[in-house]
Amino acid sequence: MITFGQIKKAVLVSIWFMFLTFPIMVIRVNPVEHIVEWRWKNMLLVGVGSFILSFVWHYFIRRKELGAQKAELGEWAEAIPLAQRIRSKKTLYKPALVAAGIFALAFPFIFSLYQTNIMASALIYVMLGLGLNIVVGLAGLLDLGYVAFYAVGAYAYALLNYHFGLSFWMVLPIGAALGATFGILLGFPVLRLRGDYLAIVTLGFGEIIRIILENWNEFSFGPSGIANIPRPSLFGIDLSVHNATIYIYYIMIGLCLLTIFVVNRLQDSRIGRAWIALREDETACQAMGIDKTKTKLTAFALGAMWAGMSGVVFAAKTTFVNPASFTIWESIIILCIVVLGGMGSILGVIAGALVLILMPEYLRALSEFRMLAFGILLVVMMVFRPGGLIPNVRRTYKFEGVANDEKS
Amino acid sequence: MKNYLGKACIAVIVLVCSMFMVSGVGLATDTIKLGVAGAHSGDLASYGIPSVKAAELVVKDINARGGILGRQVVLLVEDDVCKPEVATNTATKLLSQGVDVVMGHICSGATKTALGIYKAENIICMSPSATNPPLTQSGDYPNFYRTIASDDAQARLEVDYALNVLKAKKIAVLHDKGDYGKGLAEFAKGFLEKDPRSTVVLYEGVTPGAVDYSAVVQKISRSEADAVIFGGYHPEASKIIMQMRKKRMDTAFISDDGVKDDTFIKVAGKYAEGVYATGPRDTSKNPLAIAATEAHKKAYGSDPGAFFLNAYAATQALLNAIEKAGSTDYQKVSQALKTEYVETPLGRIKFDDRGDAIGIGFSIYQVRDGVYVEVK
Amino acid sequence: MDYFLGLFLGGLTRGSIYALIALGYTMVYGIIELINFAHGEIYMIGAFTALIVISVLTLMGMNTIAILVIAGVIAVVYSSAYGYTLEKIAYKPLRAAPRLSALISAIGMSLFLQNYVLLAQTSDFLPFPNLVPDFEFMEPYAHIIGSAEIVILITTAIVMILLTILIKFTNIGKAMRAASQDKTMALLVGINVNRVISFTFVVGSATAAIGGVLIASHIGMINFYIGFIAGIKAFVAAVLGGIGSIPGAVLGGFVLGWTESFATGYISSDYEDVFAFLFLVLILIFRPQGILGRSDKHKA
């Protein structure tokens, strides 16, 4: 299996990496006391490690290329992902859905408060991911400032509650409306922009919102944030922390189901098709008579709406908001959820959110290597599954012929 | 399908929640579980990790002497990265593990988030470093204590020093836009504006992590300030002070205990000379502080980091209160914290009704020949 | 007037650093249309490598000028090597994939490199020695501009000139321009496009490393996180000038540097970044392709 050529390649790779990592891995300096520490052991580690990894890497790259060749030749047998096959078979699909539903409902009683809490966080990100999926996945507008709408929702609840004592359930629709309004506000100036110009302007928008929240003390209480935001109450009864967490978990399950339902319906609606057309080719889309302005603005508004809502839940769950929770990293994480899960695919986005949000929690055992592993995972995932965990399969429409129609 | 699920959801929620309200949560164990929470990774890790080491040292010491009330002390160390949303995970994880008392959180925002959760479960929480005044002054958190002075106390000290000792007339107040730095700067500005002896000529936030601060430094220079009061952490402080001195400005620089860190002197080098910073009263002569520092050097082979002694004192105060109270009962421990004095590296301390420590003083330090020296 | 001049030169210095980093973004983007998110990390690695080399050489007792030159050269070599490897691992396998996948891969690489330096070195800030001596003839102007800033400006100018010569007059420069216009056509006329892409990464990383060493020496401190913010700002500069255009990246860097400097100087540094971004939005509303960008109708 392993040829001489491959060994030679691996040796070269390992020498290259030993050279590459030499200053940073081997030498550690203390510029104050002028101490230089040489850690030769690390060099050996890098050498051996990269030698082995080189084999693994090239093996998988070859497999991937082989798969690509097969696909070109028309051998599609393995190409349909598992999730899609389950979906297409009614007998498998329904029991799987019911099992997932029962598991989701029973979750807080099987696992501890901590597990319920992080699962509720993950569900907030499912919602955020599904919302961003409308903008990025369906309409193909790269938005790096999505967190701004999340912040709008969170501050809407915090401030409306602080000043007017509005309750969670009253603010939830207000948050959604505010999110959508800000989405349209952002949408107007960027209508003419494409691709990466759009990305950088949305990034700027996200930062502007955060900086305003940081500096405008009279309005937002600045970086010290707003504390003591009430958790949602159940028919006017205040719950203990434990029960409130479970309650929020169920609220999130409900909201996620709503999101899935709505996004699913949107996808197949007239406006959903227009988004996909816009993503594929803006010029052709306009030529087909689709109103570009309206289509783009609805994508921004409907995407931002979910972020506004999840912001409200976020504020209720953490009971504290400050601008530090809404940095650009948050936008990036949400974008990662969408792309890693599979752009445009609802199931993929859910899987992406669960993996990306729960993994750092379960990786706590790795402690300081946590973020390192996270970075590697992103690269490896993208290299070997560029379409995402559960890629979206475009709905295909077949014309079955007139004969079929007559039969049915 | 989905409609049914929704209705089923609501039904189950109501059922379940009513069940939960009846049953209480109670855990009895034969160990005392001390939670240690704070930033143990990420960019603020250097403020959180020393507290873990402090707790480890105190607990090792106490367990070697047979524990407390005949029970061994177990540490539950959890990271919150100083982010409020992660702090809820940290707090619930500690609760799920049946924690008795918590030493932490490091940042004020994360502390506020976690306190809400601890309060509901009657868990006492003591922070070595959260300085935000409302934590103790608002009365919202009866379960909170701290072994550090609050922002307003520090700001008061800085302002008094600038006015009384340095006789500064024009003062520039800067901050790093963070919850710690800006909070402090707001108080400093407030105190200065009330005092007729001086004017605030500049009040600005600098962007943390910016490539350089030359424009802000130009602005300070134009404002002709006699003194700069800076609220924030040492990386920004050293960048500003270095650019000021390179521009040949000899304006006095007064800052807080986020800057009273040896890393500041190491990074700013000769430019750090003459900088003032507030910090806990000089502890170099306290035998307990010397012993704690020595123990750290022996166990970890390095000098302790920021807030180490505060965390050491907090751990001791918590465990002492449990011992005096004879149990981990919330009421009894609270009572013990407020009545029983305890000898710590920061001095002989107890806590007032709001949760601030009595017996910990703050003083002004100045960098002289590469070390912080207390200014009398 | 001194005040205005101080702000102007401060903005120019900051802008030069942005420009040096933005060049890498813009060249890579011009050829493979990828936002190389990890580019800021290359700049950070350049600065770290320089610090390590300087510390080792200082212990060996070399004189300052020799240290400066050697550290600079090694930092450039290593940054280029990292840039080259980065492309081979994280971007080349994704050439045919959706563009966003490559972006996520780049974000992953950025996280990896940050934490790699954090773990292998330290999370603390490290002091970076001041390599540029205070020139005596500069002393009367020290309150406006320092010697280090002069060195930054001159170095940036030299790098720009060299880069222009490289792209305008050498064979590889011609190949780069050809590949950025049409990769398939470039292949057909016998250009090794893969090699051109690698070369682009190497050159871009080298300029970032120069920026890294210069600014670290000026600011006097580094840690593993400095690349992120500088990288974002440089990206803004590249887009502002028209991404893909090399003079655009330089101009974008200067414009951004000045905007920030004057906004801080005449308004408030509280909203420094807000003004920078608002200015960007304004320019893009009237010139959606950036200041010097090509208006490219068929590119989506």
Image: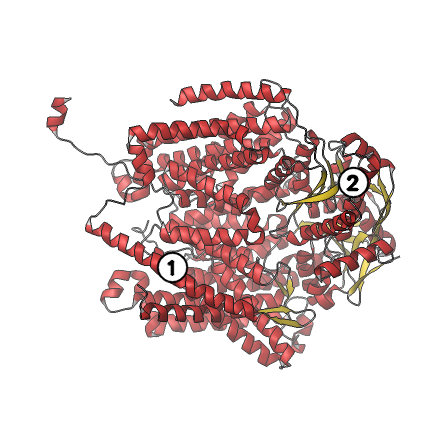
Query: Disc 2 vs disc 1: which is toward the camera?
Result: 2
Q: Nearer the viewer, residue C128 or A98?
A: A98
Instruction: Pinpoint the chain carrying mark 1.
Output: A
Please name the residue shown 63% across and 72% down the image.
Answer: A36
Q: Nearer the viewer, residue B147 or A282?
A: B147
| Crowdedness near tag 2: few (<14), some (14–19) or many (≥20) residues, C-alpha within 10 Å | few
* Kind of residue indicated by mark 2: Gly
Q: Nearer the viewer, residue A375 or A261?
A: A375
Q: Quadrant of the C terminus of chain A?
A: top left
Query: At which x and y percent is residue A56?
Result: 38, 59
Q: Are marks 2 and 1 in contact (CB under 8 Å)?
A: no
Please name the residue shown 80% across and 68% down the image.
Answer: B369
Residue B262 in view (yes/no): yes
Query: At which x and y percent is residue C295?
Result: 34, 54
> Judging from the image, what secondary structure is the residue with disc 1 in?
helix
Please name the residue shown 81% across and 46% down the image.
Answer: B156
Q: Which mark is residue B99?
A: none
Task: Report the side of A387 relative to A398 (left or right).
Answer: right
Query: At which x and y percent is residue B329?
Result: 77, 31
- Count numbered badges in the picture: 2
Q: Is residue B115 above or below residue C281?
A: above
Residue A262 in view (yes/no): no
**Pointers 2 and 1 within a single chain:** no
Label 2 to label 1, Cα distance in Å? 56 Å
Q: Which mark is residue B70?
A: 2
* Kind of residue indicated by mark 1: Trp
Query: At which x and y percent is residue B58?
Result: 76, 49
- In the picture of the structure, the residue carrying the numbered disc 1 is A57
Task: Report the side of C182 relative to B288 (left or right).
Answer: left
Q: Quadrant of the N terminus of chain A?
A: bottom left
> Judging from the image, what secondary structure is the residue with disc 2 in?
loop
